[in-house]
């Protein structure tokens, strides 16, 4: 987004999120992915996050659908080292970029659902998973940068005289993000010179935000309208209380060692009964999404978002959009937040 006329504050880069597979018919899911990809591009998003875990479709194949349905949107493919060799990741990136002349971005993920990792016999401790992620990503980036033949000897990954064909067009070099709110996750992002993406804490928890060195990104959902009442009416209709979802969330918490998951869960507990104060955790508590929501009037939500823009955030991954009209309202909020950040 470029914001309003005359704004000198650095623009924020917007990415949307691709709908995760939740069952249902093949045709309906394909249509949903295609629609959301087209809406996101039309709204000015630069890319779209594609999730990965044991219960979803392969993110590379979903990313190919996104590419085929859009003109320039970049898939931000979630990559977990336990799923494939780093050479296979580099090969997927260069192959898709070559075939479609499209940049393929990488969202490097160290963890995931604990039971998913256990099922794959991956018992690597939390912080060591980030050490592994650094080695893994360095091999990928060396291959994509044409620094070959690549030889790397690490604790977790090693390659010898490895080359990549076809070479990646340097103008299509991927944007790399690292998901994680822990100290180990932030250190991994710094080691890779990648963009750290975290979850925004509510306004009253400014001091609880992880320390960032310069620019960073956030993942957040937004529901905004002219009035508070209208915004909350829409938000509560979209995400009604769901007892089954709450039980699923509680079960996931018992087996999770994810720092961000625990941080969000603790925030949700603290804010139970706190009223309508912009920062909303019910969709997360009901296992409907994995990020907090900002809900309220355009003015109020823009002010909350501007707080992050003035502290180095210039990258926002939005939750799965409900409609093209909703994306239009969100970009309006972003423009207002940019204006507020510029004034600040």
Image (tube, rainbow, N blue to C red):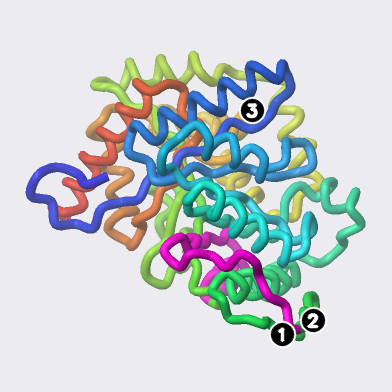
Quadrant of image for the C terminus = bottom left
Could you tell me residue 6's position as x and y percent?
7, 49
Could you tell me residue 245's position as x and y percent?
70, 25
Q: Which residue is mark 2?
A: 155
* Residue at the outermost left position: 6
Mark with earlier residue (3, 1): 1
Residue found at x 30% / y 27%: 329
Residue found at x 48% / y 64%: 169
Give the structural element (helix, strand or loop) at label 3.
Answer: loop
Mark with earlier residue (2, 3): 2
Residue 238, magenta (yes or no): no
Residue 151: which numbered mark, if any?
1
- Foreground of the two, 142 or 76: 142
The answer to whether residue 22 is left or right of residue 307 is right
Q: Which residues are magenta?
A: 161-190
Q: Which residue is mark 3?
A: 286
Disc 3 and disc 1: Cα gap in Å? 46 Å
Could you tell me residue 232's position as x and y percent?
39, 20
- Foreground of the two, 261 or 86: 86
Give the structural element (helix, strand or loop) at label 2.
Answer: loop
Residue found at x 54% / y 65%: 168
């Amino acid at each position: 987004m470029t914001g309003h006329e005359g704004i000198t504050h650095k623009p924020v880069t917007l990415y949307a999120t691709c709908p995760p597979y939740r069952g249902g018919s093949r045709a309906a899911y394909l249509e949903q992915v295609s629609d959301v990809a087209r809406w996101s591009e039309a709204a000015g998003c630069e890319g779209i996050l594609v999730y990965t875990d044991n219960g979803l479709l392969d993110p590379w194949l979903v990313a190919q659908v996104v590419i085929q349905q859009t003109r320039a949107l970049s898939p931000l493919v979630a990559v977990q080292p336990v799923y494939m060799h780093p050479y296979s990741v580099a090969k997927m990136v260069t192959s898709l970029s070559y075939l479609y002349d499209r940049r393929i971005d990488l969202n490097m993920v160290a963890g995931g659902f604990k039971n998913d990792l256990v099922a794959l016999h991956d018992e690597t401790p939390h912080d060591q998973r980030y050490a592994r992620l650094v080695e893994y990503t360095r091999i990928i980036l060396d291959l994509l940068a044409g620094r070959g033949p690549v030889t790397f000897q690490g604790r977790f990954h090693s390659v010898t005289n490895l080359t990549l064909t076809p070479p990646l067009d340097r103008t299509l070099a991927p944007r790399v993000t690292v998901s994680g709110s822990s100290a180990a996750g932030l250190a991994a992002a710094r080691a890779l010179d990648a963009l750290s993406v975290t979850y925004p804490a509510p306004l009253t928890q400014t001091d609880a935000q992880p320390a960032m060195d310069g620019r960073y990104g956030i993942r957040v959902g937004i529901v905004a309208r002219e009035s508070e009442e209208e915004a909350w009416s829409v938000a509560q209709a979209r995400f009604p209380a769901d007892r089954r979802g709450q039980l699923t969330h509680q079960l996931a918490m018992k087996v999770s060692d994810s720092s961000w998951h625990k941080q969000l869960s603790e925030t949700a507990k603290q804010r139970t009964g706190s009223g309508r104060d912009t920062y909303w955790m019910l969709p997360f508590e009901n296992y409907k999404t994995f990020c907090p929501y900002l809900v309220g009037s355009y003015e109020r939500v823009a002010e909350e978002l501007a707080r992050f823009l003035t502290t180095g955030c210039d990258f926002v991954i939005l939750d799965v959009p409900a409609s093209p009209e909703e994306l239009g309202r969100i970009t309006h909020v972003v423009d207002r937040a940019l204006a507020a950040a510029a004034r600040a």
